[in-house]
Image (spheres, coloured by chain):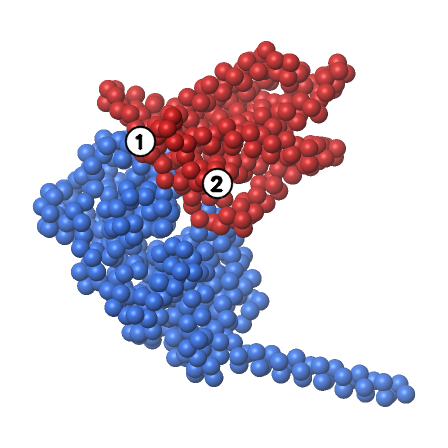
């Protein structure tokens, strides 16, 4: 009797285990998991929200087009996690997500300090991460080969800002020779500042003010006073949204006519347009991505994505969202090319990938390829100018779709 | 000279906002011996209330470009009611278990309120377009931004009113007695819990007023309170813990110190400078710069 009982139990558990394994195998064939680890709490949560919104659109498009065909049409499944706003929090979340899931790859952390902190976890777990963080220090031989930066490098922003100033000087004979640089004191600010300083000097501009300022300022009056004292004719600020707004309104209240060429982030996100109303028009900034660059505008599928974003989320598709759509698409293309959800094979595929179409072409100039350090070799920042309440791409001419209005 | 005067002016204007936030913080500490770690989140909540009211529209006519300020008094009263509920529903209950649960409660509330704001209102930055943002008066080479100037003037007015309330009203006398010794005040027939209730309402009402005064030129978002409250904490320690009127001078001093450091030394050192002052006061005059002898309201 006891023997029969044991035999029944053994058969029962065999059936259960077989069913669980079969279900897991079926699920593995059905879906490919990728992690999307971005700040969803704290002062930069808005960045994470933009990325998650764009991820939903990208995944929807990839899956509705047949999923990952080389894996039998497996659907892409994003596992979204909060990186918080703190490097230690980012490390903890990344470790947890990478340990608890079988991932083909990841997109994220968006901010340079978080990405720098979490990078060793990706290397340790051999999971490739595509990122929009711009710090130059991320794309060096020290990154372990698991990081792929889809956005332009921080120093490239400075290059483009200075090139644009030369273009403006030529076009409108503005005679600008004195420049001021103000940057938020964090890796994003310092990386961008380095590029601006070097190139501004090469371009013959006199740097009359070059200063960092602390994060989370509540008053920009001292910054505005410094700019005025310096006699600068052009200001290159590298700021988040709250600082950007305080600086712009401070300059306006001081009746300053200094030309502002922003360094992205705060100068191009929807809230700055909403809060300044008509006064935002004419504002110029560098950007990692813009919704009407030639590569997006010329392809109805891609411009359709920007329209769907506007419809779904009530604002134009911002920089971080555009990069995320491209980044998720590039990751999917790498999984497709690898024909496997093994993250090591996906990493190798990313390293060899040359994207010229699909969602990855969302990134200007319409193609993506990574060098040995994981830097995107084709991408250049764009210069936008707010016109009629929306940022339009006005430079470089290769991707511009609007004429710059004289500042 | 112009640079010096402009720096002082800039410092006083932002200091006025720090002062309004610090005053309520110090009132709660002075009367209840409670460090309210959720004070910044009450500021954030007040800003959401004010932005919500402001998006209904501005008062036409009489207020002109100042139309957005109609939200100031309603926001102050809404937040005073929130303070009333905060004391009755949470602080009073936590007080039965001693001071530590009260402090832990405010820390928990601070974290929870940020998360709740993000869930309810999203993480985006909100600023109602209005003519005060960027408006200024220029005189004698100086530039006076209207938004911060109004906050500063109101801060001075509120200081006078608070000084009068604490010196001349029945509540003020009771509050000062409770601040000296709650046990003795109770034995003398003062209803200590009522004093606590009114003090909390006033403190949170004041932070609501500060919120309404800064929304014309500051973004509202879930973590905004932290940007102001950290400086307000430094201000009350420098002024003297529990010294309500002194907190105003502490707030102004913080603003001026930040501004002068930025103008004459380095922009990036402006925050470090106020921490250095904070350390110096803790070492040299731990009772605070504006407090003589024992702590006082």
Q: Which residue is mark 1?
A: B135
Q: Is residue B38 left or right of residue A366?
A: right
Q: Residues within 10 Å of mark 2 (few under 14, many from 20)?
A: some
Task: Return the residue nearer the eye: A251 or A86.
Answer: A251
Residue at the far top: name it.
B168
Task: Return the residue nearer the eye: B112 or A294.
Answer: A294
Which is more N-terminal, label 2 or label 1? Answer: 2
* Chain identifier of the residue bearing label 2 in the image: B
State the hue of chain A. blue
Is residue A220 placed above or below A150 in the rendered structure? above
Q: Residue at x 28, y 70 (%)?
A: A299
* Chain identifier of the residue bearing label 1 in the image: B
Q: Residue at x 38, y 55 (%)?
A: A315
Residue at disc 1, secondary structure: loop
Q: Residues within 10 Å of mark 1 (few under 14, many from 20)?
A: some
Is residue A366 placed above or below A136 in the rendered structure? below
Report if residue A9 is visible in the image.
yes
Task: Return the residue nearer the eye: A217 or A322.
Answer: A322
The quadrant the C terminus of chain A occupies is top left
Is residue A313 placed above or below A242 in the rendered structure? below
Residue at the far right: name it.
A1
Residue at the far front: name it.
B61
**Camera-side mark, 1 or 2:** 2
- Residue A109 horizontal/vertical position (percent): 44, 58
Q: Which residue is mark 2?
A: B52
- Residue A76 horizontal/vertical position (percent): 48, 73
State the hue of chain B. red
Q: Residue at x 42, y 66 (%)?
A: A57
Residue at disc 2, secondary structure: helix
């Amino acid at each position: 009797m006891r023997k029969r009982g044991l035999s029944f139990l053994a058969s029962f558990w065999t059936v259960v285990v077989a069913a669980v394994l079969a279900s897991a195998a079926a699920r593995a064939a059905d879906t490919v998991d990728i992690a999307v680890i971005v700040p969803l709490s704290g002062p930069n949560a808005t960045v994470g929200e933009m990325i998650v919104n764009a991820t939903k659109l990208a995944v929807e498009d990839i899956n509705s087009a047949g999923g990952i065909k080389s894996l039998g049409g497996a659907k892409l499944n994003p596992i979204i996690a909060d990186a918080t706003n703190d490097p230690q929090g980012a490390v903890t979340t990344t470790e947890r997500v990478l340990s608890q899931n079988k991932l083909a790859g990841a997109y994220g952390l968006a901010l340079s300090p978080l990405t720098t902190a979490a990078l060793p976890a990706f290397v340790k777990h051999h999971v490739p991460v595509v990122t929009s963080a711009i710090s130059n220090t991320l794309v060096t031989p020290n990154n372990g080969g698991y990081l792929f930066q889809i956005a332009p490098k921080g120093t490239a922003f400075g290059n483009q800002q200075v090139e644009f100033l030369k273009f403006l000087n030529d076009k409108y004979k503005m005679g600008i020779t004195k420049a001021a640089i103000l940057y938020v004191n964090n890796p994003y600010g310092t990386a961008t500042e380095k590029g601006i300083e070097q190139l501004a000097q090469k371009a013959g501009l006199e740097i009359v003010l070059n200063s960092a300022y602390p994060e989370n300022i509540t008053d920009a009056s001292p910054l505005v006073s410094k700019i005025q004292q310096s006699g600068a004719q052009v200001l290159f600020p590298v700021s988040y949204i709250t600082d950007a707004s305080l600086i712009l309104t401070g300059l306006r209240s001081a009746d300053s006519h200094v030309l502002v060429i922003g360094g992205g982030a705060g100068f191009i996100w929807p809230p700055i347009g909403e809060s300044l109303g008509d006064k935002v028009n004419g504002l110029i900034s560098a950007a990692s991505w813009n919704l009407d660059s030639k590569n997006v505008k010329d392809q109805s599928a891609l411009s359709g994505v920007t329209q769907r974003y506007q419809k779904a989320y009530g604002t134009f598709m911002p920089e971080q969202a555009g990069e995320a759509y491209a980044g998720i698409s590039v990751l999917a293309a790498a999984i497709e090319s690898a024909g496997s959800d093994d993250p090591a094979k996906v990493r190798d595929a990313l390293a060899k990938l040359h994207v010229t179409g699909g969602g990855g072409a969302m990134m200007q100039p319409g193609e993506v390829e990574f060098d040995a350090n994981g830097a995107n070799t084709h991408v250049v920042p764009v210069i936008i100018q707010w016109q009629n309440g929306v940022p339009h791409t006005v430079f470089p001419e290769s991707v511009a779709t609007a004429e710059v209005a004289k500042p | 000279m112009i640079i010096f005067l402009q720096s002082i002016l800039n410092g006083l204007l932002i200091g006025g906002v720090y002062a309004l936030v610090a005053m309520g913080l110090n009132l709660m500490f002075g009367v209840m011996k409670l460090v309210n770690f959720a004070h910044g989140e009450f500021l954030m909540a007040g800003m959401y209330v004010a932005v919500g009211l402001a998006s209904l529209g501005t008062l036409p006519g009489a207020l002109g470009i100042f139309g957005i300020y109609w939200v100031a008094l309603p926001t102050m009263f809404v937040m005073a009611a929130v303070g009333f509920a905060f004391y009755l529903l949470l602080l009073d209950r936590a007080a039965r278990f001693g001071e530590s649960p009260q402090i832990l409660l405010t820390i928990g509330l601070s974290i929870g309120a940020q998360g709740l704001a993000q869930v309810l209102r999203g993480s985006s930055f909100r600023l109602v377009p209005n003519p005060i943002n960027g408006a200024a008066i220029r005189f004698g080479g100086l530039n006076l931004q209207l938004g911060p100037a109004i906050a500063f003037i109101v801060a001075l007015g509120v200081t006078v009113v608070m000084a009068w309330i604490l010196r001349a009203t029945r509540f003020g006398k009771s509050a000062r007695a409770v601040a000296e010794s709650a046990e003795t005040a109770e034995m003398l027939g003062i209803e200590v819990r009522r004093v606590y209730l009114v003090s909390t309402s006033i403190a949170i009402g004041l932070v609501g007023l500060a919120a309404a005064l800064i929304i014309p030129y500051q973004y509202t978002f879930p973590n905004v309170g932290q940007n102001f409250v950290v400086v307000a904490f430094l201000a009350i320690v420098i002024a003297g813990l529990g010294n309500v009127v002194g907190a105003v001078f502490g707030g102004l001093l913080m603003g001026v110190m930040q501004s002068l450091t930025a103008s004459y030394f380095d922009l990036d050192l402006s925050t470090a400078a106020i921490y250095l002052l904070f350390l110096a006061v803790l070492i040299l005059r731990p009772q605070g710069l504006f407090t003589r002898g024992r702590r006082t309201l």
